[in-house]
Amino acid sequence: MRPEDRELVAQLCAARAGLRVDPEKSYLIESRLAPVARREGFSAIPDLVTALRTKREDRLAWAIVEAMAQSETAFFRDRAPFSLFREEVLPTLARVRDGEPIRIWSAACGSGQEVYSLAMIVEDERPEMPGIKVELFGSDLCERQLEKAQSGLYTQFEVQRGLPIRQLVRHFEKVDDMWALSPRVRQMVRWRRINLVADLSTAGRFDVIFCRYVLCDLVEPMKARLLENLARALSPEGFLFLGEGETATGFEDAFQPVAGRPGLFARNPAFRVAA
């Protein structure tokens, strides 16, 4: 790819989704766009970019942005946030909600491992919390990632990355060379394509939001927009999980770090987002 083509891709990703793409990383860009070019019927990536310049087709532009937005995901990634969710956040909200549904959102859920990890925790903890009601939501920018997530099918490599053996045995079944998540757990999650830096005023309110390793992938102006969107979406008693090393810079009045719990933020009930 020519430097100007890589620059165009970077500009497109920043404008559409706030995504930070380094135009110098030619291998990354080409490896992400090669499948798009083949799928769209182009013989090479330069032909794909030429069509983007000349046709300005919205569908093609989003296909490129979605391909560049794919991020790493794994079951129970980093462990600690899921232990906090299981041992502290979920029991706390169960007491506060007193039978009312607890709404949990995995933003930028990728191919589903994060939100399914949360669903398995909820399912495993039901005997300890009789009567608990939980609504789980998974969203991503990439339609293809969401399609894979909804299938509940994972390779041996994918289940080996972070999934404890007892969870594998309890919640999965071997189907040919894939592992299929149980229908019971799959049906716990609702799915939606969401651009996190777009207007989320109709997304609703959530008691827990996992939005991990998203801020670090955004261009600077869009980080504030995302945090404002999350502040709008989080209930007054809610909790926000960010990725390791990520902070709510500029929104400290909205999100208070929970002492001794890296990556966990509590919503300040007194904070009001400007209309």
Image (cartoon, rainbow, N blue to C red):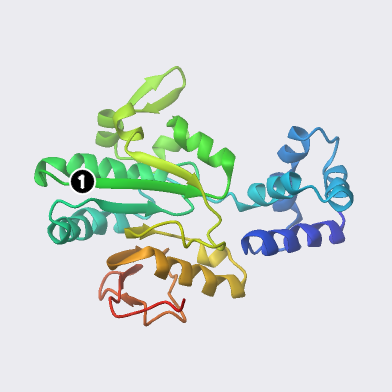
Q: Is mark 1 on a helix, strand or loop?
A: loop
Identify the residue at image location x=87%, y=56%: 2
In this rendered view, identify the residue nearer to me: 192 or 84: 192
Query: Would you call the spot at circle 1 few (<14 residues within 10 Å), some (14-19), or many (20 or more)?
Result: some
| Residue depicted at 16% across the width and 46% down the height | 132
State which quadrant residue 197 falls in: bottom right
Q: Nearer the viewer, residue 176 or 48?
A: 48
Q: Position of residue 16 (x, y in %)?
A: 67, 59
Q: Is residue 24 at all visible to an observer of this figure?
A: no
Say which residue label 1 marks: 133
Indicate whether 240 appears above or below 69.
Answer: below
Measuring from the top left, give residue 172's x and y in whole percent: 33, 28
- Amino acid type of the residue that numbered disc 1 sits on in the rendered structure: Lys
Which residue extends farthest top?
Answer: 176
The spot of residue 192 in percent (x, y) is: 48, 45
Q: Which residue is drawn at 55% across and 51% down?
A: 71
Closer to the camera in the image, 87 or 187: 187
